[in-house]
């Protein structure tokens, strides 16, 4: 501490400087750089090495201070006046009087300038440029669409949004969340379109977050969901600025979080989770057909294992004779009953998925080969499982991969097990009972007061973008269930 | 405690309760049954024994694991026979010498022996319709001049089981319209409705007549006609074809037409339609069948016995002559069937049903006298046949002007 203060060469006591130094002194990346301003005033720059752009500090800030010539009788007030009048080449400078605020600014990429004996300091935002460049989306690739994706810096992300929506109505309101992380979260919406109640609710949810840091997107998602911690994703996330802008234009509220290459959209709905960005780049007829197929496949991946166990264990009369005979022959030497067999296979499938995620990319394929081919084939040959179960699980898995939302897919995976257990106990009666419970559950969900199943429930019958996608020219209204101020997306000329 | 947590705990408790109760088999909820512990039965034959008891013949599905059947003392050719005073008793008795559970949910065919059918079809059908596992879409046939057990034991030349043979015959029954498939639900429906009587396709065991011997074969041969639930008579193949025409069950068939000056022609019959109407005539209902049918001339055998189809030129007169011959032949068959039905006093052509549906009040008034009225009712057949094509190379699209 003594060494650092000596480096500052302050003759007079400077409590603000001392306080900041005291709080940061243990950090190895903490730097104090003395400076003689205009050959007259003793000062010191304080910053965290790596957080700021040192080139900009020396070229834009220090040079304009060192090389400026002050009058012989210039006082510190004249120095302040020089800085306040824009003498420093820095777009974002602030006069500070509190050590905590100064430290907060330093932690987000500012350098602080202290003066000998002064009770004020200046902070200059000259963030380091270690930013990943805008690259292609990794999860939401489409053939006909933008090739840019969000990055980790929130201001770059807001810029990506503004580069698509050149509207004065777009509002980017930032809130800082996290006692330790001080993460910037931007709430993005169209002020003349979005429902102000929804905007306020979203902001309230974010402001009410009492967390130390935003370590993952899930923390924000949970905050937006409130107390209702359903496994179904109530917040949509996207890495595509074009999808984000399209939804903002519809009246959804966007959330951009510093540090994450994803943006969130609220209120989420199951239909939104079932729509892929590609849908809007395809012909409406084809897009609608694919959407319907996607819904059918969601039913398949959710119900097929339970249906298989129900029919095989309780309702064999439902199956065609030849099919039941074929399955029976294949099962003759299998020691487990259908339920155990199916549970084991589904768990094995989950293990494969989890292992594939955790393994490095270059050996990830080996997991699939070992798991699917070697173990699967060996298990069938050893009569531990029947081929029919392998086929059912394979169909279930492939169908689950067609869901556009990974979060929705995860929810379906959990409910698949629930329905399987119900089916294993009560057969088709159990499957139907489970399906009713599931329907009741998702129908009772609300996100920021908007039904999760909207527009399928709530009497929003005019929506033309649900199971089917109508041509854009026929779809003139924004989603009714959002309660937008501006309900019309497009007006017909004349 | 939060509302969601309460709901979750409540759901888990409910699930655990249902699971434990159901696992203890104390409920009427479905119970789990291991598929491999069952013997799937494809076909059942029911016969009446001399002491009024019942014989049930089970034809299990062929599988690699037929050990369960080996214990049966009466098991021959993959058929299991069990006797009992009732159907249920026979099924339960079979259980005593079969290691696997007899499973009737996959039964696709029921064969009723002639004696059993003459005794009382309802007695044998009752158990089947009560069993919740049994499909109402299963086929049911009556054995003619044979027991159901004999039919199920009958070997075929191509190695097919009796069940497979009969299923195949039912599938192809429309090719000649000598019979037609009847499902259990139709039989039950006919037994329940006061204006209808059951009718079942008949199968018989045909001996080889080529002098070379060999195994007997199963063939489809018309219908068995029931009065209430008792077998009354069989319709032969031509009568069955006429019955199918009159009841709208006709699909395809062949007519062989001897035509003067032309020779013998073979006609493919298709596209039949029928309309049964009723009107008052002398205070009594009078019925009229209006049947339409199309035909294609598919073959001609000349007068001298040689095929000379190319030499024949069809004219308008020829057409009319052919159509009249065809209509006459078919009308005769239909009138014969109607006359037989009236003579038997059994309304299997659906006359009373038509009257009931067209005028329920009238039916209510005369239904008590229907038994005496029915044999005397005027029933008219109007048949319109149309030759569509001659299939001749040099006269494909029309006739000679």
Image (cartoon, rainbow, N blue to C red):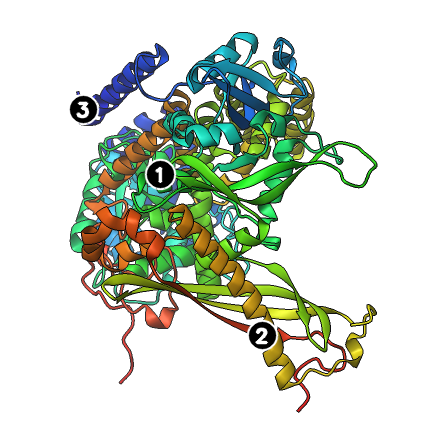
Separation (CA) of disc 1 from disc 3: 59 Å
| Residue for point 18% across, 42% down | A204
Q: Chain of mark 3?
A: B
The residue labelled by disc 2 is B323
Q: Indicate the quadrant containing the N terminus of chain A: top left, top right, bottom left or bottom right.
A: top left
Q: Nearer the viewer, mark 1 or mark 3?
A: 1
Residue A283 visible, this angle: yes
Across the whole image, how many numbered discs are drawn on residues? 3
Q: Are marks 2 and 1 in contact (CB under 8 Å)?
A: no
Residue A346 x/y as whole percent: 51, 26
Camera-nearest residue between A483 and A438? A438
State whether discs 1 and 3 lie on one chain: yes
Q: Indicate the quadrant containing the C terminus of chain A: top left, top right, bottom left or bottom right.
A: bottom left
Camera-nearest residue between A153 and B122? B122
| Residue for point 34% across, 39% down | A233
Separation (CA) of disc 2 from disc 1: 39 Å
Residue B53 x/y as whole percent: 46, 16
Label annotation for residue A364: none
The residue labelled by disc 3 is B2
């Amino acid at each position: 501490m003594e060494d650092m203060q000596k480096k500052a060469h302050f003759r007079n006591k400077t409590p603000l400087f001392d306080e900041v130094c005291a709080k940061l002194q243990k950090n190895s990346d903490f730097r104090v750089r003395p400076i003689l301003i205009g050959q007259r005033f003793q000062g010191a720059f304080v910053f965290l090495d790596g957080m700021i752009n040192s080139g900009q500090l020396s070229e834009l800030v220090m040079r304009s201070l060192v090389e400026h010539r002050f009058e012989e009788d210039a006082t510190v007030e004249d120095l302040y006046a020089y800085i306040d009048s824009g003498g420093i080449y820095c777009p974002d400078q602030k006069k500070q009087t509190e050590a905590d605020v100064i430290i907060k600014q330093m932690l987000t990429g500012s350098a602080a300038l202290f003066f000998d004996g002064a009770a004020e300091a200046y902070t200059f935002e000259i963030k380091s440029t270690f930013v990943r460049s805008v690259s292609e989306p990794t999860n939401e690739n489409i053939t006909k669409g933008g090739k840019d994706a969000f990055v980790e810096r929130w201001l770059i992300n807001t810029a990506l949004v503004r580069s698509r929506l050149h509207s004065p109505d777009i509002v980017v309101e930032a809130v800082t969340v996290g006692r330790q992380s001080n993460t910037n979260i931007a709430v993005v919406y169209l002020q003349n379109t979005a429902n102000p109640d929804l905007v306020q609710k979203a902001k309230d949810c974010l402001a009410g977050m009492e967390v130390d840091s935003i370590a993952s997107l899930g923390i924000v998602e949970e905050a937006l969901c409130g107390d209702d911690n359903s496994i179904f994703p109530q917040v949509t996330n996207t890495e595509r600025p074009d999808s984000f802008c399209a939804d903002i234009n519809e009246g959804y509220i966007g959330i951009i979080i510093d540090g994450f290459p994803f943006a969130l959209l609220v209120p989420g709905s199951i239909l939104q989770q079932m729509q892929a960005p590609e849908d809007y780049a395809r012909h409406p007829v084809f897009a609608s057909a694919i959407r319907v197929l996607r819904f059918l496949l969601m039913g398949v991946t959710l119900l097929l294992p339970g249906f298989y166990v129900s029919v095989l264990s309780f309702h064999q009369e439902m199956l065609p004779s030849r099919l039941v005979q074929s399955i029976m022959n294949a099962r003759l030497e299998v020691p487990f009953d259908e339920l155990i067999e199916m549970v084991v296979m589904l768990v094995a499938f989950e293990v494969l998925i989890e292992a594939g995620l955790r393994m490095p990319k270059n050996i990830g394929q080996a997991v699939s080969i070992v798991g699917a081919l070697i173990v699967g084939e060996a298990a069938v040959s050893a009569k531990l499982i029947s081929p029919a179960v392998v086929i059912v699980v394979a169909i279930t898995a492939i169908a689950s991969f067609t869901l556009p939302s990974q979060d929705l897919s995860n929810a379906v995976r959990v409910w698949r097990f629930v329905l399987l257990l119900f089916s294993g106990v009560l057969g088709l009666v159990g499957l139907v009972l489970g399906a009713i419970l599931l329907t009741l559950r998702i129908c009772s969900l609300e996100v920021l007061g908007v039904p999760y199943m909207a527009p399928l429930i709530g009497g929003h019958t005019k929506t033309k973008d649900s199971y089917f996608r109508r041509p854009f020219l026929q779809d003139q209204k924004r989603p009714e269930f959002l309660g937008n101020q501006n309900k019309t997306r497009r007006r017909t000329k004349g | 405690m939060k509302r969601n947590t309460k709901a979750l705990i409540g759901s888990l408790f409910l699930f655990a309760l249902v699971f434990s109760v159901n696992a203890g088999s104390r409920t009427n909820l479905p119970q789990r049954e291991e598929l491999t512990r069952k013997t799937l039965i494809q076909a059942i034959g029911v016969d009446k024994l001399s002491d009024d008891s019942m014989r049930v013949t089970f034809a299990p599905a062929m599988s690699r694991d037929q050990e369960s059947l080996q214990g049966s003392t009466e098991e021959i050719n993959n058929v299991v026979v069990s006797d009992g005073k009732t159907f249920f008793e026979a099924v339960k008795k079979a259980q005593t010498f079969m290691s696997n559970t007899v499973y009737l949910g996959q039964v696709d065919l029921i064969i009723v022996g002639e004696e059993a059918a003459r005794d009382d079809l309802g007695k044998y059908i009752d158990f089947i319709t009560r069993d919740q596992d049994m499909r109402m879409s299963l086929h049911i046939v009556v054995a003619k001049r044979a027991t159901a057990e004999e039919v199920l034991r009958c070997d075929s030349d191509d190695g097919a089981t009796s069940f497979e043979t009969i299923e195949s015959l039912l599938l192809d029954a429309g090719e000649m319209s000598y019979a037609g498939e009847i499902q259990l639900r139709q039989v039950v429906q006919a037994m329940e409705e006061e204006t209808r009587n059951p009718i079942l396709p008949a199968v018989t065991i045909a001996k080889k007549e080529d002098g070379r011997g060999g195994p007997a074969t199963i063939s489809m041969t018309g219908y068995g006609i029931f009065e209430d639930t008792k077998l009354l008579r069989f319709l032969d193949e031509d009568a069955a074809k006429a019955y199918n025409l009159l009841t709208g069950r006709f699909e395809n068939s062949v007519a062989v037409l001897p035509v003067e000056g032309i020779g013998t022609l073979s006609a493919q019959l298709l596209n039949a339609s029928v309309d049964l109407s009723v009107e008052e005539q002398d205070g009594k209902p009078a019925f009229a069948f209006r049947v339409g049918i199309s035909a294609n001339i598919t073959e001609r055998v000349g007068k001298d016995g040689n095929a000379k189809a190319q030499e024949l030129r069809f004219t308008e007169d020829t057409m009319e002559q052919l159509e009249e011959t065809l209509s006459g032949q078919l009308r005769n068959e239909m009138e014969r069937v109607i006359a037989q039905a009236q003579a038997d006093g059994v309304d299997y052509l659906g006359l009373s049903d038509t009257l009931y549906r067209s005028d329920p009040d009238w039916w209510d008034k005369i239904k008590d006298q229907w038994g005496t009225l029915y044999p005397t009712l005027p029933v008219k057949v109007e048949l319109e046949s149309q030759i569509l094509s001659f299939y001749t190379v040099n006269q494909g699209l029309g006739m000679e002007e």
